[in-house]
Image: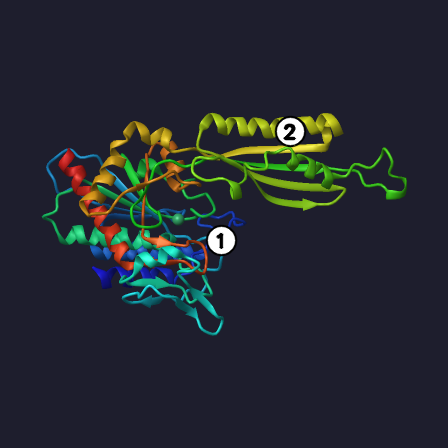
Amino acid sequence: MKQEIMDRFITYVKVDTQSDGSSDTTPSTEGQWTLANMLVEELKTIGMEEVTVDENGYVMATLPSNSDKEIPVIGFLAHVDTATDFTGTNVKPQIVENYDGETIILNKDLHIELSPNDFPSLKEYKGHTLITTDGTTLLGADNKAGIAEIMTAMKYLIEHQEIKHGKIRVAFTPDEEIGRGPHKFNVAAFGAKYAYTMDGGPLGELEYESFNAASARIRILGKNIHPGSAKNKMVNAAKIAMELNGKLPVDEAPEHTEGYEGFYHLTGLKGDVEQTDMSYIIRDHDKELFQKRKDRMQEIVDELREKYGQDKLQLEMNDTYYNMKEKIEPVKEIVDLASQAMKKLNIEPNIKPIRGGTDGSQLSFMGLPTPNIFTGGENYHGRHEYISVDNMIKATQVIIELVQLFEQEA
Ligand SMILES: [Zn+2]
């Protein structure tokens, strides 16, 4: 399985599939079509059925049931795009066999290295086969490792008919990194009762709680007057912006929070006396606290409107996604089964709340409860991204165990 999964992974990461939030099309970039079409061919080649790609680049396929039992249809998903934070053009993966636990030189000429001093968890991978970047791009293990794992698991199941399972659906989707993954996902066409995204990080990760998320954009309109004659006339939009931010609790920011602690995050600030634009993201796992945060933002804007004039501040606040726990908790057995599958493989499940969202956060609210399982990758979205091939194989085995557990439970 090792060579096979490595070959797949390396083929996928060489396709530049970085998504682009400024594009209106789906997928947002042409490279995602390239990979989607490659995956369609591969799914057919390994013997999957009902292989389709729709007009928005969503690839779906079926592995039919080989059991007489009534078993819920289970789905596995991964996204084809890579993050926008760092370039994904011309990825040149490097293979480190039998990793010795020491510093890996990613790029000699540019003096870029991957060192356990900066990334202590590297130590845990002693003896593993690692795949790294050459220091000039991201790797794209997020989420091409997930694709390689799902593909390899399906091929394994096709070649091992003695392993009993129900109907399995797989989907490879575009534009997760720009938050649009589920937007055009056809839940009805997919037809699964439950699904799993193979989109987590290190070994054992299992997630079914995400943030509740909103964005707020504030435009402040000032009035610029010659400073020599500005008394009682000038309104300085930039200073109102500072006043606004000053009313938010200093400690409730990403750099001061962890675990279940929510935050306000100033993601952008641009302006001058005449006009200043601010953007925030608001996050909280707890639904009530999430609402309180949004209320507080509204109150602050209202206070400043009272002070400077109703027309001086514009606020646009939108919900982005919700904590999937609300939809997964009632079917908690799907998390328990994933946990059991890991334990059967001697993997200690690491269940923790995501300080972010996954495609599952939206899909769960679209009627498809979707927890998230590890892929084995580390340091996503940057040049220090790497993945353990050993743990990719374990993720593949989790899929294979999990579908058997669903069959046995039925
Ligand atoms: Zn991802």
Q: Is residue 296 above or below residue 218?
A: above
The residue positioned 32% from the left and 62% from the top of the image is: 130
Mark 1: secondary structure: loop
Identity of the residue furthest to the right in this view: 229
Chosen colour scheme: rainbow
Marks 1, 2: nearer the viewer: 2
Choose between 289 and 235: the one closer to the eye.
289
Q: Earlier in the sequence, mark 1 or mark 2?
A: 1
Q: Quadrant of residue 388?
A: bottom left
Tell me how far mark 1 sits from mark 2, CA to CA. Answer: 32 Å
SS type, badge 2: helix
Number of residues whose C-alpha sits closer than 10 Å to that of mark 2, classed few (under 14), some (14–19) or many (20 or more): some
Along the horizontal axis of the image, is 306 left or right of 2?
Answer: right
Reading the image, the residue beneath label 2 is: 300
Asked whether 176 or 68 is in front, the reply is 176
Q: Which residue is mark 1?
A: 84
